[in-house]
């Protein structure tokens, strides 16, 4: 297991339990106390975990789910596999909306292959990458900058989205519970809903760690998406419901 993967596993383990003793982490992950402390220090600097005397606790779930720095290092192999498959959605000459998710960030490597392309995004991180690409017209959505997401959200961003129409919107979600996609932050939820409303085709990218989890705000019923790309094995009844609704379900293999 790589250091990044181990940090992600530690963060998830602590988040599920709320508070965990250091000795337990040493035993569960089979590494030295020094290694565990090093990982915890890294996660504490990102604001994901909080160090206690002989133990570690999770920060509030909204912070855990949303921190851009942590999301960049979580489930990277799955995100890359999903992005490779979802690149088939991109068409030369079209206008594409990309949300601020790190799952969508993995898609950026594939954008030059289908240029020319017009890309709209509320992500500062995505904008910096796209700005360096030839034959990519970048439209950066303004609004209130939020460092937790490294993105622009709020009323101004929503207002701009209400005035545009695009061929394709690609987004992710904080959690999948039952047949709905969920987001922790209400402002992020409204921006993503505005993106979906502006798009002729709606695509959801979501790795398997999001399934069976809960976040506070409803983004959309899964049947609202034209395609869903994931590495997870969905329950048969959910997969059948999605396909009956005309949703294309693409399940990738993570190597």
Image: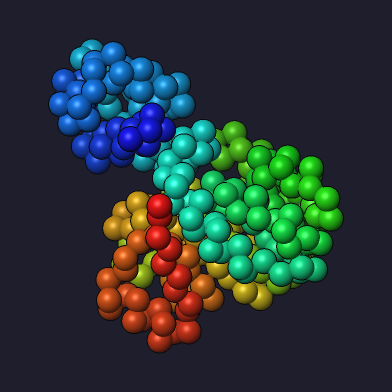
> Residue 237: image x %, image y %?
28, 78
Name the side, left or right, on which 132 lies relative to 30: right
> Residue 190: image x %, image y %?
57, 57
Residue located at (43% from left, 41% from top): 74
> Residue 181: image x %, image y %?
42, 62
Name the side, left or right, on which 82 lies relative to 110: left
Name the side, left or right, on which 68 lies relative to 124: left
Does the image show residue 11? Answer: no
Q: Residue furthest bottom?
A: 244
Residue located at (44% from left, 73% from top): 249
Check the image and report above or below for 10 versus 167.
Answer: above
Quadrant in which the N terminus appears: top left
Does the image show residue 109? Answer: yes
Q: Quadrant of residue 144?
A: top right
Residue closest to the eye, 38 or 162 = 38
> Residue 85: image x %, image y %?
53, 63
How is colour applied across the structure in the image?
rainbow
What is the tally of numbered marks visible in this picture? 0
Residue closest to the eye, 49 or 60 = 49
Q: Quadrant of residue 38?
A: top left
Residue located at (16% from left, 20% from top): 23
Residue located at (40% from left, 78% from top): 242
Q: Residue furthest front?
A: 255
Residue closest to the eye, 241 or 86 = 86
Check the image and report above or below for 20 versus 188.
Answer: above
């Amino acid at each position: 297991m790589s250091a990044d993967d181990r940090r992600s596993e530690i963060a998830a383990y602590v988040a599920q339990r709320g508070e965990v003793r250091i000795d337990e982490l040493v035993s569960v992950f089979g590494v030295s106390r020094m290694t565990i402390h090093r990982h915890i220090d890294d996660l504490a600097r990102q604001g994901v975990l909080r160090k206690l005397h002989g133990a570690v606790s999770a920060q509030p779930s909204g912070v855990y789910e949303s921190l851009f720095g942590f999301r960049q290092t979580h489930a990277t192999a799955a995100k890359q596999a999903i992005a490779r498959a979802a690149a088939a959605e991109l068409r030369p000459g079209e206008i594409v909306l990309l949300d601020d998710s790190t799952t969508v960030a993995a898609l950026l490597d594939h954008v030059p292959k289908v240029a020319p392309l017009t890309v709209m995004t509320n992500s500062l991180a995505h904008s910096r990458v796209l700005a360096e690409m030839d034959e990519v017209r970048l439209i950066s959505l303004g609004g209130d900058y939020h460092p937790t997401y490294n993105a622009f959200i709020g009323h101004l961003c929503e207002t701009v989205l209400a005035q545009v129409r695009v061929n394709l919107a690609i987004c992710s979600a904080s959690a999948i519970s039952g047949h709905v996609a969920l987001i922790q932050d209400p402002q992020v939820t409204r921006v993503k809903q505005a993106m979906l409303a502006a798009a002729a085709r709606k695509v959801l990218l979501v790795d398997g760690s999001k399934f069976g989890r809960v976040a506070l705000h409803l983004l959309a019923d899964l049947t609202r998406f034209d395609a869903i790309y994931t590495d997870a094995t969905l329950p048969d009844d959910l997969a059948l419901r999605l396909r009956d609704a005309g949703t294309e379900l693409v399940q990738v293999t993570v190597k």
